[in-house]
Image (tube, helix red, strand yellow):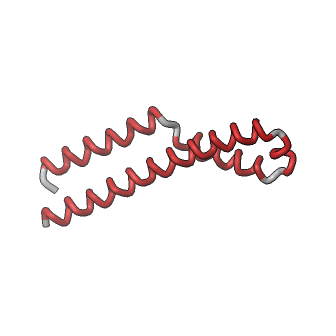
Amino acid sequence: ASTETTLLIDSIRQSIDLLGGVFDYEAAVSRVQELDSLTENPKFWQDKAKAQELMRERNQLDSSIKSIRSIEHEFHENIELLELGEN
C-alpha cells in the first residue's frame, strides 16, 4: 500500500477506535444479553411499564451494536478495495 493509502487507513482506523471510546461496545453486547435473559422470565412481563422501558433500552443498544458492526464491515471492505486498486 502507498504511504497515502496507509495514512488514510490509519486515520479511518483511529476514527473507528474513537467510536469505541464513546460507546462501550462490549458493555452494550453484555447488557443486551442480560436483557434477553431477563425477557425469558415470565415475571419480567408482569410489570408492563418496566418491561417496555427495558425493551426500549435493549432495542437502542442493539441498534447501536448493529451500526458499529456495519461500520467495521464497510471499513474492512474498503481497505480490501484500496489494496486491490494499488496492485
Residue 61 location, x and y as percent?
57, 43
Left or right side of 82 for 56? right
Q: Residue furthest top?
A: 22
Q: Quadrant of residue 26?
A: top right
Q: Residue furthest front?
A: 48
Left or right side of 73 for 42? right
- Taking the spot 36% from the left edge, 42% from the top edge, the residue there is 16
Left or right side of 66 for 3? left
Left or right side of 49 for 20? left
Residue 27 location, x and y as percent?
59, 40
Instruction: Using the image as rendered, state which of residue 75 and residue 6 is in the foreground.
Output: 75
Residue 13 location, x and y as percent?
32, 45
- Taking the spot 52% from the left edge, 37% from the top edge, the residue there is 24
Number of numbered markers: 0
Q: Quadrant of the C terminus?
A: bottom left
Q: Quadrant of the N terminus?
A: bottom left
- Taking the spot 12% from the left edge, 53% from the top edge, the residue there is 2
- Taking the spot 26% from the left edge, 44% from the top edge, the residue there is 10
